Image: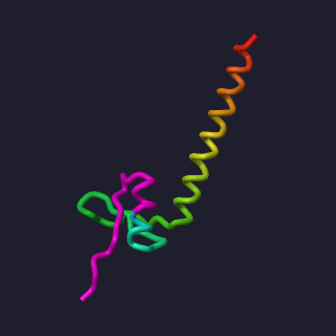
Amino acid sequence: MSADVACIDENASLHDVLATMKTHRVRRLPVTGPQRRLVGVIAADDAVRMLTDELHALAHALSEQVKVEQIARP
C-alpha cells in the first residue's frame, strides 16, 4: 500500500508551494491542473529562483521610489 502523493495546484501561491514542501519534507512537487492531471513538477530550486526574482523586483521598485522622493524634496 502506498501513501498519497503530495501535489500542488497550478494556481497555488509561492507561499503555498514552500509550505507544502516543508510539511511533506520534499524538494519537488507534482503540479496538477484541472481534474488533478499532472501539468508539471516544481522543485525547491525553482521556488528559490522565483523568490529571488520577486525580491529583485521589490528592491528595484523601492529604489525607484527613493529617487522620486529625493527629487520631490527641495
Which span is picked out in magenta? 1-19
Residue 30: quarter of image: bottom left
Any magenta on residue 18?
Answer: yes
Q: Quadrant of the C terminus?
A: top right
Q: Let me know if residue 2 is in the magenta part.
A: yes
Count of residue discs: 0
Given the current orientation, which residue lies at the most extreme front position? Answer: 74
Question: Front-most of 73 and 3?
Answer: 73
Q: Position of residue 72 (x, y in %)?
A: 70, 14
Left or right of residue 46: residue 38: left
Residue shown at the point (41%, 65%) measured from the top left: 40
Quadrant into which the N terminus falls: bottom left
Please report the residue visible at 34 percent of the width from the left and 71 percent of the height from the top.
Answer: 6
Q: Position of residue 12 (x, y in %)?
A: 37, 54
**Residue placed at 46% from the left, 64% from the top?**
42
Which corner quadrant of the image does residue 26 belong to? bottom left
**Left or right: 6 as drawn, with respect to 49:** left
Seen from the viewer's position, the closer of residues 36 and 68 is 68
